[in-house]
């Protein structure tokens, strides 16, 4: 006989609505394929219009979280509210009442997984969060199960669709950042206040969760170096193209003998790299494991049904597994004491300077790089002096330390040898 499993959904916005739709429409499919009779037993959302639009029957519309949690037919609570206010209170209450929780909330998991997982363990229930990172791409399950045989040394992800959409458009259409952002907002890719996405905060939450799981230790988001895309100029994307690079906002995690390196920033990658062809609002995560070598997962990182795909996969997992597998990193808010984080990381760099086109300038600039121990791979002046305005000088370095580049560009700026227009890391 099929196992009967009741679900409550808290928050029927884009993801919650997609989850409701998927569970209702695929009920018979899951009954047949999973031997689980999964039904929506309650929903909680004050916006009646949303519930009407989804055709939620009156008898499923709960008035309060207390009513949802007191319902004996509810086994699993899906939280798709977002944020860390009411969502945290409701998730905590659900776990305390012994109900397993499935959440799509990256900020909640990034900041409070330690606390929530403790409550889940104490109450013998599960906490699942596949949808918290990279929407429909099954990266969490891959890290927990699929690649568990491996020591993961590196991950690089395009984990934010909004910024990937903007950078793709800037690259293919040559449009500038401000007008592309406006277009992304008009199409609903970017939010009215785009800060969370364009300044890289969303990516740091996801990288914190993913690198904690990949490296089996807590990687607090506060340890992640972050730089967004709002300062990117279209001309740098074009100059990068001439050098054979594509610009992406990457979430990078490396686990080395010297420590853990975690950073989110615009990055030039060679056109031949698999991540270079991940365009528009698509996401991808590229992993290197010691046994499997390189693998890449690709798909939609947002949207109602892609994200519902991840939420419902967790619901099915929770419904069909009695063994609960918690995160393998130490359950703590902070980094473990013995874990070293590398802030003065190594990278190659693309640097655009604006220089006066006259004798001796190049020698002074290369002198500053040499003094800071920076070796140059390529240097090219774009055009000749036409008036008083400076001409662009593009410098690409070998692998070097972040602090060496910081010192060199500060020196160049301070002494007025040239104006520093852009510094972009190259992987
Ligand atoms: N705002 C995110 C993005 C989607 O643009 O990818 C949800 O994580």
Image (cartoon, grey):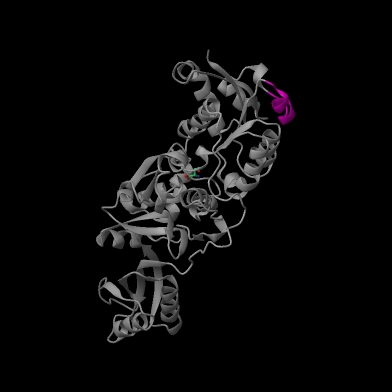
Task: Tally the numbered discs.
Answer: 0
Q: Residue at x 45, y 47 (%)?
A: 160
Q: Give the vertical position of 192 relative to 247 (above or below).
A: above
The picture quadrant where one finds residue 386 is: bottom left
Q: Residue at x 54, y 44 (%)?
A: 327
Q: Residue at x 37, y 41 (%)?
A: 298
Q: Quadrant of the C terminus?
A: bottom left
> What is the x, y in percent for residue 251?
44, 54
Residue 224 in view of the camera: yes
Q: Nearer the viewer, residue 22 or 355?
A: 22
> What is the x, y in percent for residue 93?
71, 36
Q: In the drawing, does residue 403 fall left or right of residue 274?
A: right
> What is the x, y in percent for residue 7?
60, 25
Asked if the magenta segment contains residue 89, the reply would be: no
Q: Nearer the viewer, residue 336 or 154?
A: 336
Residue 79 in view of the camera: no
> What is the x, y in percent for residue 393?
31, 73
Q: Nearer the viewer, residue 307 or 142?
A: 142
The picture quadrant where one finds residue 87 is: top right
Asked if the magenta segment contains residue 63, the reply would be: yes
Check the image and name the residue furthest to the top: 1
Q: Give the vertical position of 349 relative to 71 (above or below).
A: below
Check the image and name the residue furthest to the bottom: 360
Q: Nearer the viewer, residue 265 or 103?
A: 103
Q: In the drawing, does residue 225 fall left or right of residue 356?
A: right
The picture quadrant where one finds residue 338 is: bottom right
In the image, the segment drawn in magenta is: 62-72
Q: Give the vertical position of 211 relative to 282 (above or below).
A: below
């Amino acid at each position: 006989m099929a196992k009967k499993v009741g679900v409550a959904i808290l928050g029927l916005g884009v993801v919650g609505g997609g989850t409701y739709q998927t569970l209702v429409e695929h009920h018979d499919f899951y009954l047949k394929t999973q031997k689980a009779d999964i039904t929506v037993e309650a929903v909680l959302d004050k916006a009646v219009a949303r519930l009407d639009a989804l055709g939620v029957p009156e008898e499923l519309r709960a008035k309060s979280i207390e009513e949802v949690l007191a319902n004996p037919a509810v086994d699993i609570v899906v939280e798709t509210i977002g944020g860390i206010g009411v969502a945290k209170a409701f998730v905590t209450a659900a776990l305390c009442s012994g109900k397993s929780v499935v959440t799509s909330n990256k900020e909640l998991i990034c900041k409070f997984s330690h606390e929530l997982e403790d409550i889940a363990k104490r109450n013998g229930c599960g906490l699942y969060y596949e949808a918290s990172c990279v929407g429909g791409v099954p990266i969490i399950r891959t890290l927990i199960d699929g690649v568990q045989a491996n020591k993961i040394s590196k991950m690089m992800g395009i984990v934010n669709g909004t910024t990937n959409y903007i950078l793709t458009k800037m690259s293919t259409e040559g449009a500038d950042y401000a007008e592309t952002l406006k277009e992304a907002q008009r199409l609903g890719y970017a939010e009215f206040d785009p800060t969370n996405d364009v300044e890289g905060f969303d990516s740091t939450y996801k990288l914190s969760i993913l690198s904690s799981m990949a490296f089996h230790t807590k990687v607090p988001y506060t340890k992640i170096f972050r730089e967004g895309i709002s300062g990117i100029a279209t001309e740098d994307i074009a100059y990068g193209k001439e050098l054979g690079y594509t610009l992406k906002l990457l979430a990078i995690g490396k686990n080395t003998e010297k420590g853990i390196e975690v950073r989110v920033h615009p990055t030039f990658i060679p056109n031949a790299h698999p991540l270079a062809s991940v365009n528009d609002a698509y996401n991808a995560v590229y992993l290197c494991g010691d046994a499997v070598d390189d693998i890449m997962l690709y798909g939609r990182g947002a949207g109602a049904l892609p994200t519902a795909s991840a939420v419902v996969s967790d619901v099915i997992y929770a419904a069909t597994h009695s063994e609960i597998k918690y995160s393998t990193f130490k359950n703590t808010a902070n980094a473990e004491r013995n874990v070293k984080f590398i802030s003065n990381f190594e990278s190659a760099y693309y640097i655009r300077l604006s220089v006066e086109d006259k004798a001796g300038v190049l020698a002074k600039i290369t002198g500053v790089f040499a003094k800071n121990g920076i070796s140059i791979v390529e240097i090219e002046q774009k055009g000749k002096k036409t008036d008083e305005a400076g001409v662009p000088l593009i410098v690409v370095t070998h692998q070097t330390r972040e602090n060496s580049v910081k010192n060199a560009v500060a020196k160049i700026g301070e002494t007025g040898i040239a104006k520093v227009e852009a510094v972009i890391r190259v992987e």
